Amino acid sequence: MVQGAELIPYNIDSILGQTSCIIHEGELDAASSIAAGFKSAISVPAGANSNLSWLDRFMETHFEDLEEIIIAVDADSAGIRLRNELINRLGAERCRVVTYGPECKDANEHLCKYGIASLRIAIEQAAEVPLEGIFTAADLHDDLRALFDNGFGPGAETGWEEMDKICTYERGRSVYVTGVPGAGKSEWVDELVLRLCLRHQWKIGFFSPENTPIVYHLRKLIEKLTGHRFQNGCGMTEGLLANSEDFLTENVSHISLKGNVSPDRVLAKAHELVVRRGCRIIVFDPLNRFDHNPQPGQTETQYISNLLNKFTEFAVQHNCLLVVVVHPRKMNRNPVTGITPRVEMYDINGSADFYNKADYGIIVERDKEVGATRVYVDKVKFKHLGVGGMASFVYDPVSGRYLPCEESHDPSLSADQRVRNTMFDNSCWLPEKELF
């Protein structure tokens, strides 16, 4: 294969104009299906890789009109992950899964061991994906076995070392981020999701109507990616700009709608981003920019509860990380001490369910006097993903990055001396491109 060549599925054009296809993990497996009489058989490029960006190009032209998709990947842990990703992208309602039987992990092994007729029967008897919302232990056998064998692993890390000690992330979860106006919620969320994208290839979809025009938001993202101010003569070269644009084109999408922006309408667009673009992170920033229309007689608490249920269901069904920025109620100073209390999750305006139904609850607090931003993780629903706590940062106004630091609480030190050991970073985060 020519270095740098585009990776596409083997035999991809065989499924054009067909109503059914078979997806294998390797070319030999696809060839085995073809030998068994199934002409519309393909294999994924690069084997059991959960990065399905190759699907983007072919989704409309090759896969959209298929009525039945038979997933015939390997029966090992990597194949199971690939199977789940394919079902997630292509839709469980039209997918069936092949089981190869004892001592056979793929189609070619089955062909060699049992012959063409047996392989044909195995493919024809591919089982439907289990009914949505109904599970037995048998349905979850593979996942249960993998959990037993491998244990609870940590979630996805961000590269912020102190943050990763208290909180890691898992897809299928909802994150609610709050803080007083001006605390830096949006800036911090932007860096959070960029870090997850860079480290784990989770593509991002934004609905961020306060970041308009969209090019203003892209400018901020480019500054975070490159470590340079978005301006000629400040280290931002034409090459860096072009590479940044390529990265954002591949990994970041924005939802921008005219007219009524209801939650259902935005969720429908987010669904398209998951299916068409392979987005694994969806950001709603902020929630109060939706057009909310409660039903007649519905209280605010009831409306919010139903809305959060929709968000949770979306994250689970689409196996994505949903990040929602929300505003707190007005925080009043203590008349005796003159101190404004720290925002907590129960202070989010509208309902206690923002805390109760969150998988993660995060508060961003900016201390102008000390010059630090504190990020409090007040809730992590599952203990293998984190224990919660606080991490301190210094905000870099040039790059827009949050730089980890240590913060002393020694009252003998003046406010401007409490931040120390700031971990400065102006390196370029963009992945190096292959030379060919």
Image (tube, rainbow, N blue to C red):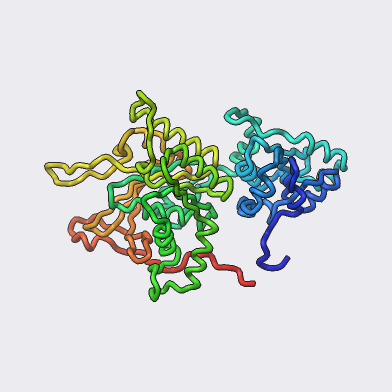
Near-viewer residue (278 or 396): 278
User: Foreground residue, 420 or 272?
Assistant: 272
Furthest-left residue in this view = 336
Number of numbered tags placed on the structure image: 0
In which quadrant is the N terminus drawn?
bottom right
Q: Position of residue 90 (x, y in %)?
A: 64, 42
Spot occupied by residue 301 in the image (x, y as percentages of width and height): 34, 29
Please, which residue is most extreme toward the bottom here?
233
Question: Who's the residue at 81% across and 48% down the image?
Answer: 108
- Residue extending farthest to the top is 297
The percent position of residue 81, horizontal first and vertical second, equals 63, 45
Position above or below: 231 against 25? below
Instruction: Say which quadrant the C terminus sits in.
Output: bottom right
Residue 276 lies left or right of residue 160; in this view the side is right
Q: Residue at x 39, y 47 (%)?
A: 285
Would you say 284 lies left or right of 46 here? left
Is residue 322 or residue 405 the one in the foreground? 322
Nearer to us in this view, 280 or 273: 273
Classify residue 373 as left or right of residue 290: left
Q: Give the side of residue 187 with respect to residue 338, left or right.
A: right
Residue 373 falls in which quadrant of the image? Answer: bottom left
- Is residue 254 in view from this perspective? yes
Residue 149 in which image quadrant: top right
State whether residue 246 is above or below residue 409.
Answer: below
Q: Is residue 387 visible?
A: no
Percent x, y for residue 152? 54, 43
